[in-house]
Amino acid sequence: SGATALATLALLTLRRALLPPLSTAQTTPAQWRATRLLAWTLAKSARPAMAPAIEAAVFGALERIALSIVGEGKRQDVKTAFDTLPLEKFRKVATKAVEDVLEARERAVVKLASNFTACVQHSAGYQAAFTEERPVTMVILSASASVAACVADLARASAATKMRVKVLVLESRPGFEGVEIARAVLDLVGSDSVVEVQILTDAGVGWAVGEADFVVLGADRVTGEGEVSNKTGSLAAAGLARVVGNGCKVVVVCCEEKILGYDGGGEELADADGGEENDESEVTAAWPARAKEVGELEGVKVRNPYFEWVPRQFVDVYVTEAGEVGLEELKKVARERGELEEWLFDGI
């Protein structure tokens, strides 16, 4: 599952654990401690490549729980307030806070998609396509719900001006997630708008980028320095934009929950979590029998890395639910993430 889906599951787990029979706490302080410990476990035991979204979701829920009780600007009063708060009232407030976060995350994706559409429609690439009476063309890969929502929103908005949208989808081996996102885009667009979808092999990335106005990437992690972790294949697409692209721009779309509360760079993080490499059978499953024999020979290793880092110099624009953002905004969110974590788990 993608990072966004895993974050939603984590929030639902947190909500269920607030109530019996999962909760056995007898007092509000005990319940608050148990809730924080569960949130920590959900966040820190997650796949490293997808941890930021889960951390942002569950830590954001904890913050909303606390501030719903003590109010904004009174963080220092949390312990005192919880000591005297009836357990049932805490559970009611906490459940509502988690539900509010779930709803806010849905609104964030809608806002993200709207901001992406505005970004593209005001770009030189879009205006050139309009003037030349050709489709605005973009390359996408992997199964990102955010990317699908953004592309679909652009297609619907462009239909009003008779502007066509063409999407070149890399199939995204080994799981062929590109095929999944192609279906997702078509389902979201519906029958009122027209979007042309072409699916091609990952090896065709050079040709695809050469045809495109935009490479649109999702993100599982974004550092405060602007480095982006995403599905393997993202680096090639982004890097080629400046080599074979005719003015092609690389746009990263993600909600702020994907921004790491960490001041390190992508290389440090890759070293720390060891990357994520999965079973070779996912790769060889699509091979003909004779090719599979090669993979079994001594000295041959089949590699299956899932994620890679895209350096910030290959990214032209970052779009979040807050709009187009630069490095200062990314650093600000990263810093706030770190400060929130320190406050929530101080003394636990």
Image: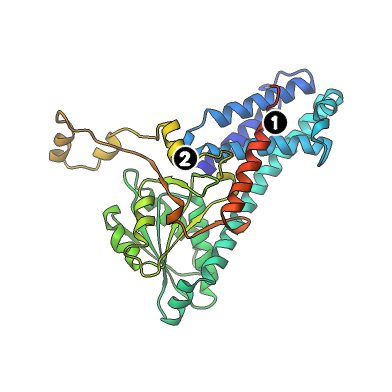
* Relative horizontal placement of residue 245, taking residue 94 as reference (left or right): left
Give the labeled residue for mark 1.
344
> In what element is the residue under mark 2?
loop
Amino acid type, label 1: Leu
Vertical order, 24 against 299 (above or below): above
Vertical order, 341 against 243 (above or below): above
| Residue 168, x across and y down, in percent | 36, 62
Amino acid type, label 2: Ser
| Residue 157, x across and y down, in percent | 55, 70
Q: Residue at x 39, y 51 (%)?
A: 234
Image quadrant containing the C terminus: top right
Residues packed near mark 2 inside 10 Å, few (<14), some (14 to 19) or many (20 plus): few
Given this view, does label 2 or label 1 mark the residue nearer the observer? 1
| Residue 301, x across and y down, in percent | 22, 33
**Between marks 2 and 1, how big is the CA–CA gap?**
27 Å
Camera-side residue of 131 and 200 = 131
Q: Return the mark for residue 1.
A: 2
Q: Residue at x 82, y 35 (%)?
A: 69
